[in-house]
Image (cartoon, helix red, strand yellow):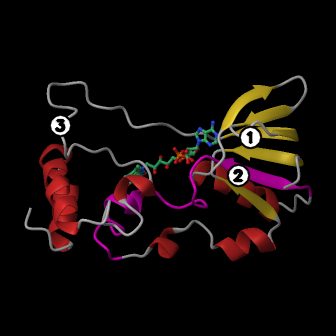
């Protein structure tokens, strides 16, 4: 892995991915890397609570761009790495394994996090938040126990709204 890029994008969500795409579309020829703490290359989040959850779309169909395209566009995807600190004067970030990466321009696209409930019962088994693919489970089945998974999700729907309830029904849940 190179440790210097002309543009370093921190955050591999839609915003970060789109920034890298826009640079290439505008004929930027310098080196670009996207550092993201998730293990997956950028994907769309809305389907997590819709088509992906309902098993209407596989993961590869919700990718913002296929892996091959990032290679063709010479955008390095540094997945599974979290930026821990930024030295603005030195134009350098430090990632969680201690490695330093230098940059010419930094794009900060770290998005947001789900705000957890704080009411009574917020920590009960079966209360989830969905922000990432990992929250849904790579095979849509959580830890592999499908019945348990479904039982857990039923509880989520009760608290989480009609859309998830509807998608659960489509996925065959008896919710
Ligand atoms: C389940 C779900 C359904 C949604 N449905 C809709 C919808 O129907 N319509 C709609 O308009 N919007 C919807 N949204 C919202 C939409 O997906 C977000 O607005 C969008 O994902 C924001 O993109 P982003 O790139 O700004 O941030 P994010 O998607 O949050 O991406 C930021 C990324 O940066 C990473 N990151 C954070 N800190 C660091 C760090 N220090 N180092 C490295 N990486 C870091 C995070 O892990 C994350 O991968 C939905 C979101 C979710 C979760």
Q: State the image coordinates of residue 155 (x, y, percent, origin top left).
A: 14, 49
Q: In this view, does 115 lie above or below 148?
A: above
Q: Nearer the viewer, mark 3 or mark 2?
A: 3
Q: Eyeballing the image, is 175 above or below 100? A: below
Look at mark 2 in the image and give the residue it sits on.
Answer: 19
Magenta residues: mostly which secondary structure?
loop
Quarter location, residue 91: top right
Q: Label 1's element?
A: strand
Q: Is residue 166 left or right of residue 103?
A: left
First in sequence, mark 3 or 2: give its number: 2
Which residue does the image show at 19% across and 65% down from the upper left?
A: 168
Question: Can see residue 35?
Answer: yes
Horizontal placement of 45 versus 3: left or right?
left
Using the image as rendered, state which of residue 28 and residue 17 is in the foreground: 17
The residue positioned 18% from the left and 72% from the top of the image is 170
**Magenta region, residue range:** 30-56
Q: Residue at x 14, y 58 (%)?
A: 151
Quarter holding residue 11: top right
Q: How far apart are marks 1 and 3 (CA)?
A: 38 Å
Is residue 162 shown to the viewer in this render?
Answer: no
Local crowd at mark 2 within 10 Å, few (<14), some, or many (≥20)?
some
Query: What SS does tag 3 mark?
Result: loop
Label 1 or label 3, whichever comes before in sequence order = 1
Rounded to the nearest whole Å, what is the CA distance between mark 1 and mark 2? 8 Å
The image position of residue 74, as x and y in percent, is 83, 66
The answer to whether the residues at label 1 and label 2 have Cβ atoms under 8 Å apart is yes
Asked if residue 84 lies in the magenta stretch, the reply is no
Confirm or reject: label 2 Cβ below 8 Å from ligand 1: no
Instruction: Give the residue pinned by disc 1.
Output: 107
Query: In what element is the residue under mark 2?
Result: helix
């Amino acid at each position: 892995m190179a440790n210097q890029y002309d543009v370093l994008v921190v955050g591999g969500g839609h915003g970060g991915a789109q920034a890298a795409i826009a640079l290439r579309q505008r004929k930027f020829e310098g080196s670009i890397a996207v550092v993201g703490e998730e293990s997956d290359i950028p994907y769309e989040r809305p389907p997590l609570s819709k088509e992906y959850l309902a098993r209407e779309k596989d993961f590869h169909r919700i990718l913002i761009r296929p892996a091959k395209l990032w290679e063709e566009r010479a955008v390095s995807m540094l997945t599974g790495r979290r930026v821990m600190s930024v030295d603005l004067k030195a134009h350098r970030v430090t990632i969680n394994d201690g490695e330093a990466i230098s940059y010419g321009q930094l794009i900060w696209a770290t998005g947001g996090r789900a705000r957890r409930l704080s009411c009574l019962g917020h920590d009960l088994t079966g209360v989830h938040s969905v922000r990432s693919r990992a929250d849904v489970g790579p095979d849509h089945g959580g830890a592999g126990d499908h019945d348990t998974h479904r039982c857990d999700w039923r509880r989520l729907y009760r608290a989480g709204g009609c859309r998830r309830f509807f998608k659960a029904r489509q996925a065959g849940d008896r919710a």
